[in-house]
Image (tube, rainbow, N blue to C red):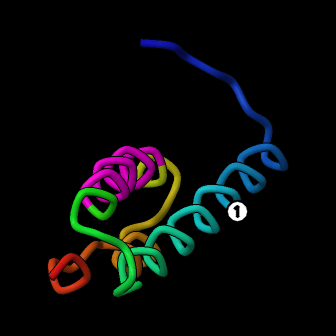
Amino acid sequence: MLGILLNDRETQEIDYLLRKELDEMLMDLKDMKLDKQMKTAIEARYKIIFRMYARLASPKQLSKYAINRKYTK
């Protein structure tokens, strides 16, 4: 495990980057052109990024990115 100290500005920047990455992955999961194997890989990455975001975000903000299984079907 690694630790990191961030000031407020850096925390806001990481929050923004993680949200944008989650948004992109949600769009990709909705894309019907992607095959199941690709969506499975995106889901695995999404879970990691989501857990990182959960350390910074409030429960209200986090609920926006809680993945729904409908994206993968």
How many marks can you see? Answer: 1
Q: Is residue 44 magenta?
A: yes
- Quarter in which the C terminus is drawn: bottom left
The image shows residue 21, relative to residue 55, as above or below, that is: below
Magenta-highlighted residues:
40-52
Indicate the secondary structure of the residue bearing disc 1: helix
Name the residue rendered at 59%, 66% in the picture. 19
The image shows residue 63, relative to residue 58, as above or below, that is: below
The image shows residue 39, relative to residue 4, as above or below, that is: below
Name the residue rendered at 78%, 47% in the picture. 8
Left or right: residue 29 versus residue 27 is left
In percent of width and height, residue 5 lies at 69, 24
Q: Is residue 10 magenta?
A: no
Amino acid type, mark 1: Tyr
In percent of width and height, residue 13 lies at 78, 53
Main SS of the magenta part reads helix
According to the picture, the residue beneath numbered tag 1 turns out to be 16
Name the residue rendered at 30%, 73% in the picture. 66
Name the residue rendered at 50%, 66% in the picture. 22
Left or right: residue 7 versus residue 23 is right
In percent of width and height, residue 1 lies at 41, 12
